[in-house]
Image: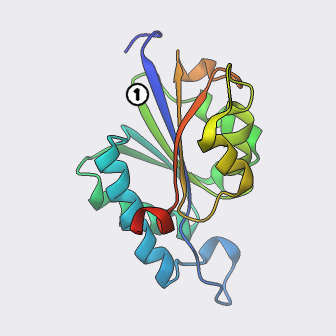
Amino acid sequence: MGADEPRRLLLLRHAKSAWPDVPDDERPLNDRGRRDTPAIGRWLQSSGYVPDLVLCSTASRTRETWDLLAPELDANPQVRYEQRIYEASALSLLHLLRETGNGYRTVLLIGHNPGVAELAVGIAQMADGPAGEPLERVREKFPTAAVAVLDFQGEWADLTPGEVRMTDFAVPKEIRA
């Protein structure tokens, strides 16, 4: 894959989690999270947003999100569980994405807020032209199990704020309706 090939970044906030008396990184999904995740997976598949690589936080709720989403994609992407995603800032997530090898066209990052929402807004906010509806919606709210779709030209190592265009944004509540 060459440097002039388009790349796609899918930023997914983990699905809704429960709050049992366990450490934060061990919290499982609740019933709504287990219901929402397959719907997002079906939306990704039907929209043609299928990843070659998945970068997933090591937290239980993100791993469970991936486990429920994966069967809906009809694909077998490489999966990397990254502890660095848990509690990561937008800048840390950007650095992690820049380490992605250039053999991947579409990367799905499954993480946590506020880092995921801040990354989505931070890298797309300075793109040429109007920000567009998806970006405005993300600025307003990035709910659990929501996914932002961002496209850019070039290599992952050169992923730069302002060179990325947010092209889509989906929320489980809306795609189930």
Residue 150: where, in percent of width, then height?
A: 54, 34
Residue 112: where, in percent of width, then height?
A: 65, 58
Q: Nearer the viewer, residue 46 or 145?
A: 46
Please identify the quadrant where the C terminus is shown.
bottom left
Residue 38 falls in which quadrant of the image? bottom left
Q: Secondary structure at mark 1?
A: loop
Q: What residue is rendered at 32% in x and 58% in y?
A: 42
* Residue type at numbered disc 1: Arg
Q: Nearer the viewer, residue 94 or 15?
A: 15
Q: Nearer the viewer, residue 75 or 145?
A: 145
Residue 92 visible: no
Please identify the quadrant where the N terminus is shown.
top left
Residue 33 visible: yes
Residue most extreme to the left: 74
Residue 33 appears left or right of 121: left
Q: What residue is rendered at 73% in x and 32% in y?
A: 125
Q: Write down the residue under mark 1.
A: 105
Residue 123: where, in percent of width, then height?
A: 69, 32
Q: Is residue 3 above or below residue 166?
A: above
- The crowding category of the residue bearing disc 1, from other C-alpha atoms within 10 Å (few below 14, some 14 to 19, many at least 20), is some
Q: What residue is rendered at 37% in x and 65% in y?
A: 39
